[in-house]
Amino acid sequence: MLGIDDPQIWLAYVLCFLSAVGCIIYGALKWNEGEEEEEC
Amino acid sequence: MAVSTPILGIAVLIYMMVVIYIGWIGYKQTKSTEDFMLAGRKVNPLVLALSYGAAFISTSAIVGFGGYAGAFGMGVLWLVFMNIFVGIFIAFVVFGARTRRLGVNLKAVTFPELIGRRFQSRFIQGFAGALITIFMPLYAGSVLIGGARFMETALNMDYNSAVLILAVIVAAYVITGGLIAVMYTDALQGALMFVGMAILFFLTYAKLGGVVEAHQALTNMAHMVPENLAAVGHTGWTSMPVFGSPTWWTLVSTIVLGVGIGVLAQPQLAVRFMTVKDTRSLNRAVLSGGPFIFMMAGVAYVVGALSNVYFLETRGMISLEAAGGNIDAIIPAYINSAMPDYFVIFFLLTLLAAAMSTLSSQFHTMGTAIGHDFYREFLMKGKLGHTISITKIGIAVTIVISVILAYILPFSIIARATAIFFGLCAAAFLPMYTGALFWKRMNKQGAIASLLVGTFTSLFWLTFVHAKEASALGISRALFGVDTILTGTWSVVDPILIATPLAFITAVVVSLATQPDPEDHVDKCFSSLNKSDRPA
């Protein structure tokens, strides 16, 4: 896959992409969540 | 050098002026202690993400670990995955939200203070502050070496002057502008780094004929692994090292786990969670933080590994050979020969930005560790005294120590010193920090015990067992006549794998065996902690 034979490597490569995309999706979905009143 | 020094000099000058200008704005906006320590707790999410990432990724991550990928291949991509998943997602979503809330509940302004107040222990705060003061200069010194070596080769200047100039410029804006200046200059540097690495990513794949083609060419080079590296487990640049071989242990224990998990307990990074207004800012920061780390670490390691294909096609040799056997020279050698001139200038600025952003956050953390944690809370028992002045003097003193270290440490120390500091933080702080946030039953005794066990086990392992440091330090040889007191696989297992679990076990056992902390204090700490974790 992707010109890489060892699954332990292409898996890491794919996971890097997926985790970065996952962060984008998470941030977008939670964009307006967790707002709090002024404090301290 | 492919580019003319005057053009590069002008580019560096413009860049430095912008950085100093932002530092000056930070100085103007710093009015209170909280501004200086925590940037007023109202930092923008994008600034948080960029400054966290820029402080996290130093020159050593790009040049040091990128070079490691050039020599040992893509196995180090597991570290990228850890950096994004643990270093960003887990850090912001799981640790960040609670850290911020706890910081507000306890009115803590530094990482050691957060832990110290949670367990009502000035000892913890003072000890953690002292640990940072003693060991962070080693890490800062190595980042300084990376930055100064770059200025030496790129601007044709004397190495010693480069160290001094770099330290003075960073010191100037950290001391005057506090964390506001640090975070905003970091964000600018982060943006510069992002663009630089993105260009490098696309140019490299374009040059090698596409993603799959480039990888396939690298896979086909497996037979070219030098014999001495094959003997320690190297199997090729697109395959993992032989399971259990020395190369495998270094990759998995020191690099992937040590740096990958160690990041959670980095004081200069954890403190940033307390700089934002609410959990929403942390959620938003995840969006830009993940891709940012991918563009930094992911690109550096992929490009580092693929440089082998480039050097095979152009010079008929592997990267390590093209770089004269010096791992740290692989990335600069590739950039200089494969990239267009305009990009070489830009990339050198990227590296300078990476060094400066990490340095500034280290200097700030060391200064607050001395001035606030050690002087005010531990020595003065909470009396304000001359905290801000002592902090500023503290920053200056640690900078001087880092500069001295940069003069005396060997160049090859960069990646090692980074890994040592990350590992020590993981063992000393992670169990205590995790317990502080997630386990109400964890008490002061458990925290102190785990801090001491984590710290001293880690230092013991570095001095007497882990071959790389133990043989270099020579203390084991002086005392016992052997380089390491344990041999075989033990001597390649990183301290983090021994010290961190031991510190976790200590924390649990000692906490359960002693009286719980006062209930009203624990309630105060955890007040609305769960709410901010699961926003409505």
Image (cartoon, helix red, strand yellow):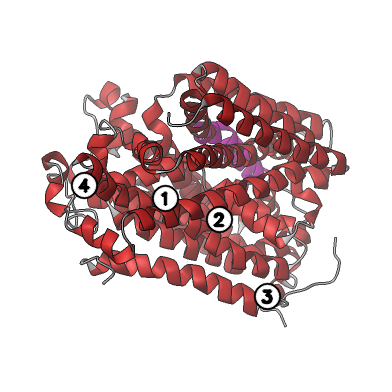
Residue B355 appears in view: yes
Residues marked 2 and 1, same chain? yes
B410 up-or-down from B360: above or below: above
- Provide the residue span drawn in magenta: B118-139
Q: Is tag 2's residue or tag 3's residue first in the polypeptide sequence?
A: 2
The Cα–Cα distance between marks 3 and 4, rounded to whole angstroms, is: 43 Å
Q: Is residue B503 visible?
A: no
Does label 2 or label 1 sit earlier along the sequence? 1
The quadrant in which residue B389 appears is: top right
Please state the horizontal and vertical placement of residue B454, each as a whole percent of the image.
46, 47
User: Are the numbered discs 4 and 2 placed on the same chain, yes or no?
Assistant: yes
Can you tell which of label 3 and label 1 is closer to the viewer?
A: 1
Q: Tell me the subunit letter for badge 2.
A: B
**Residue position marked by numbered label 1 in the rendering:** B300
| Pointer 2 residue | B432
State the SS at label 1: helix
Q: Residue at x 45, y 19 (%)?
A: B408
Q: What secondary structure is the stretch in magenta mostly built from? A: helix
Q: Are marks 2 and 3 in contact (CB under 8 Å)?
A: no
Give the residue at mark 3.
B530
Locate residue B84, reporting x and y percent.
49, 62
What's the amino acid at mark 4? Pro
The residues tagged by marks 2 and 1 sit, at their Cα atoms, a distance apart of 33 Å
Determine which of the numbered discs, if any, sits on residue B12 in the image: none
